[in-house]
Image (cartoon, grey):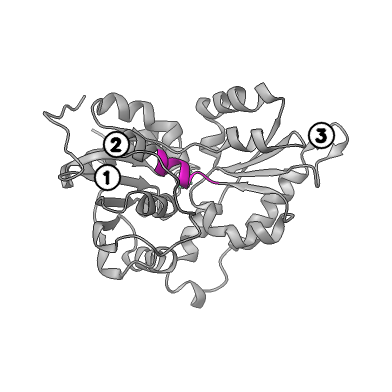
Amino acid sequence: MHSLDSLPTAATGVIGVFDSGIGGLSILQALRQALPGQRLLYLADSAYAPYGERGAYFVQQRSLQIADFLQQRQMLQALVVACNTATTAAITHLRQAWPLLPIVGVEPAIKPAAQASTSGHIAVLATRGTLQSQRFAQLVQCHAQALQVQVHAVACDGLAAAIEASTQPDHQHTAAPAQSVQALCAQFVQAAHAHQGAQGPLEGQIDQWVLGCTHYIFAMPYWRQLLAPEVGIWDTGAAVARQTRRILGLGQGELPELSDMGQGAPQSVQLLTTGSLPALQAAAQRWLQLPPEVCQAVTLPMPQKT
Ligand code: DGL
C-alpha cells in the first residue's frame, strides 16, 4: 500500500490518465473540456497494446506499474483509468494500493443504453478481457437483466490494434494492413446481428450499441455508416469527465459535447507514450488538435521476473 502525507490539490497536482494506447485520448478530450484549468498527464502504453487479448493478471500488474510511474513523475491529485479492460482487471487493486488517491474508471455504458432501449436488445462491443470479467457480468446483471434487456456482447479481437496501427504516420504507405478498421467494424456489427433472438437473428432489432472500449470511438464514422441512423451509440467520455469533476469537488454542471473536439487548453496537457512518438503525435494532432511538442516518448519496461 502506498500512502501520501497530504493529497496534492488542484493547484499542485496533475490528473493522471492512462490507457493501453491512444484509445484513452477520447476520455482525455472529455476531461479537457470538463476541467479546463487542470493539468493533465496522459500515458499511452502503446508498447504493450492491446491489453484486451492479454490476461487479467498482466493488465493488473501493468496498471499498478503505470500508476506508480505517473505518481513518481508528478504528484497526482487523481487518476483516471481511461481503459475499460484495465478498469475491469485492475481498479480494485489500484484502489487498494493507493487508498487516498481518487481513482475513476471507465465501464461500458450498459445502464443508459438499457434504459434507452425500446426493443429490449442492446449490443456491447468490447475487448475479450472486458467481456470475460466479473465486473462486466455484474454490470449486465444490475443494469440490463433488471430491465429485461438482453445484452449481445461481441469481443472485437484485433480492432483496438487496428485502430492503433491506423495512426502510424507511415500507415498509408505500408502494404495493406491485415484487416482494415472498417472491415473489422463491419465484421463485428454482423456478428451482433447474427445473435439469436426469440424470432431468429437480430438484424434490425438492436436499437442501442455500446462502445465498450475507448479506442472504438475513433471508428465512429464507420459505426455510423454501418448502423441505422436511429440507433443510439454510447460511449463514456462525458460521464467519466463528470465523475472526475465530482470526485475532485469541482461541481457537476452540463459538459460540452465530445464532438466539439479541439477546444481546451493545450498548455495544460502532457502526453507520454511507451511506443511510437510519431504515432502519438499524429493521433494527438488528428483527434485533439494538440501540437507535437506536448508529446514525449518514455521507457517503462515490465520488471524482470526473479
Ligand atoms: N482502450 C482499451 C479499452 O477501453 C483497451 C484496448 C486494448 O488495448 O485492447 O478497453
Q: Earlier in the sequence, mark 2 or mark 3?
A: 3
Inspect the image, locate mark 3, and give the three-letter code of the amino acid beneath it: Gly
- Label number found at residue 248: 2
Q: Residue furthest bottom?
A: 173
- In the displayed structure, 45 sits above or below 71; it is below
Q: Which residue is mark 1?
A: 15
Query: Which residue is denoted by mark 3 in the rendering?
Result: 197
Q: Secondary structure at mark 2?
A: loop
Callout 3–callout 1 Cβ contact below 8 Å? no
Between the C-alphas of marks 3 and 1, the distance is 44 Å
Q: Position of residue 203 (x, y in %)?
A: 81, 46
Q: Could you tell me residue 213's position as x and y percent? A: 51, 45
Range drawn in magenta: 235-242
Q: Give the image location of residue 47, x and y in percent.
A: 36, 54
Residue depicted at 43% across the width and 43% down the height: 83
In the rendered structure, does residue 141 fall within the stretch colored magenta?
A: no
